[in-house]
Image (cartoon, helix red, strand yellow):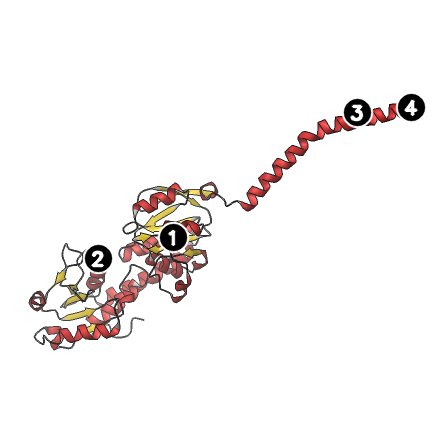
Amino acid sequence: MQGSELKNKAEQREKKYARRLLGPLTNYRRALAVLLAMAVFCPANPTALAGRLSKDRLGREVMLPDNPRRVVALAPSITEIIYALGLEKHLVGATLYSDYPARALGLPRVGSYVNLDLEKIVALKPDLCIAIKDGNPKAIIDRLEDLKIPVYAVDPRNLDSVMDTIVSLGRLFNARQRADLLVRGMSFRIQRVKQTLVDLEHRPGVFFQIGVAPIVSVGTNTFIHELIVLAGGENLAAGSVPYPRYNWEHLLALAPEIIIITSMTKAAVFEQVKAQWDQWPQIPAVRDQRVYIENSDLFDRPSPRLVDALEVLARLIHPERVGDGLK
């Protein structure tokens, strides 16, 4: 009995010692399990995953994720560029009127580019938002940054800056080869238009109408002005006012040789506008039947399709040189 009691006491001492030794280890394992669970179930902090600093078009140093996976485009032009690069799998949200290509219509909407919905953007859990320098509200951009959602601003406003944006986004998405290929194709088509229209003897006066009531055109500091000039025309609305308004007295004095009408309204309204011009046969464009109604989609935003718009304008302004051979 005495030997048995000694054995029992020894076993009890071993168990007591084991509890003291294993207790801290058990707590450690529990803590480790909690940390693992947090790593699995808690969303990662985008800033923590960021791998590189890059300066955007606002001059800010932005910490970017190495491989953006969930991207919200904060303007229709950005959506178009991402699709043109074949990177649409990264898009989880876009703004209203992001309607090209048609597949973009299925993306969740986060408000218009001038009236962004912060709550909807955050709900999409992006690891990157791409903004435009002029147009997106700075207050929303700052709030997204406060929430640790990186915002990279670009500034597509004409052909050169659209191509610059393509290169920047290609670098951002690790798709430089795709970006270079797209830019080379655009550059080739632009140069082809320039070569076709070299040594012009006459640049017809062009009135480009983008607004119906009131009549609105485009001034010098617009990408449509650039397209008109490259296409061999003279923009009759050139000047410091970006989108000047006109009455019929002004238009009669301008005497445009070519009138191009675009608008976001329906085709039936286009025909009504054209009928208004037809009331003034003394205007050269009306007299010579050079009033054209064109698809506004090509001219609405600074995207890769600006080259399509350039080719359309070149054919309308100088059919004697361009014809249908640009495409």
Corner quadrant of residue 14: top right
According to the picture, the residue beneath numbered tag 3 turns out to be: 13
The one nearer the camera, 181 or 125, is 125
According to the picture, the residue beneath numbered tag 4 turns out to be: 3
Separation of marks 3 and 1 at Cα, in angstroms: 68 Å
Mark nearer the N terminus (3 vs 2): 3
Q: Residue at x 39, y 64 (%)?
A: 105
Of the 4 image quadrants, the one containing the C terminus is bottom left
Mark nearer the N terminus (4 vs 2): 4
What amino acid type is highlighted by mark number 2?
Thr
Question: Quick one: SS at disc 1?
Answer: helix
What amino acid type is highlighted by mark number 1?
Leu
Question: Quick one: SS at disc 2?
Answer: loop
- Give residue 169's mark: 1
Mark nearer the N terminus (4 vs 3): 4
Q: Are marks 4 and 1 in contact (CB under 8 Å)?
A: no
